[in-house]
Amino acid sequence: MSTLPAVKTWKTRPPHSAIVEILTKKGDMVDDDLFDALRNEFEDLGYKDFNDLLMRLEVAGKIRTSSMSRGKRRIELIQ
């Protein structure tokens, strides 16, 4: 008797909405901390995809990113 492979379910919300919710709850964050918080829900999310999401949110006027020291960025929600 063969067993069926594990079925992945669709996420109930897109990752860009999760980013906005995380920033709403926790306030401004460093990009690494935000990525780690997002990875708790979206395990298969890569850093390139994360950067694409940040760029889209910034272009849409939802967030602002500013450079900090040594490649770190501060991500803040625009109200």
Image (cartoon, helix red, strand yellow):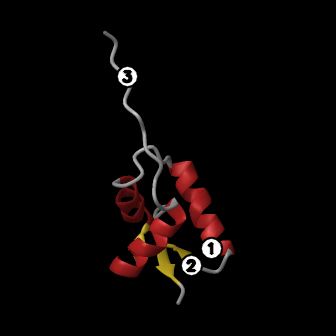
Q: Is residue 33 above or below residue 8?
A: below
Which mark sits nearer the N-terminus, 1 or 2? 1
The numbered dot on residue 21 is none
| Residue pictured at 40% horizontal, 46% vertical | 43
Using the rendered view, name the quadrant where residue 32 is placed.
Answer: bottom left
* Label 1 secondary element: helix
Q: CA distance from mark 1 to mark 2?
A: 6 Å
Q: Which residue is mark 2?
A: 64
Is disc 2 placed on a helix, strand or loop?
Answer: strand
Q: Can you tell which of label 2 and label 3 is closer to the viewer?
A: 3
Q: Is residue 36 above or below residue 18?
A: above
What amino acid is at disc 2? Arg
Residue placed under numbered mark 1 in the picture: 58
For the point 63% across and 65% down, the residue is 55
User: Contact, CB < 8 Å: mark 1 with mark 2?
Assistant: yes
Quarter where residue 64 is shown: bottom right
Report the residue that reaches farthest toward the bottom: 79
Quadrant of the rendered image containing residue 37: bottom left
Residue 45 shows in this picture: yes
Look at label 3 and name its amino acid. Answer: Leu
Give the label, 3 or 1, closer to the camera. 3
Taking the spot 57% from the left edge, 49% from the top edge, the residue there is 48
Q: Position of residue 67 (x, y in %)?
A: 53, 72
Q: Position of residue 2 (x, y in %)?
A: 34, 12
Determine if residue 68 is in view. Answer: no
Residue 20 coordinates in the image, percent (x, y): 48, 74
Label ID, residue 4: 3
Q: Amino acid at mark 1?
A: Glu
Task: Decide which of 17, 33 is in the foreground and name it.
Answer: 17
Residue nearest the observer in this picture, 5 or 58: 5
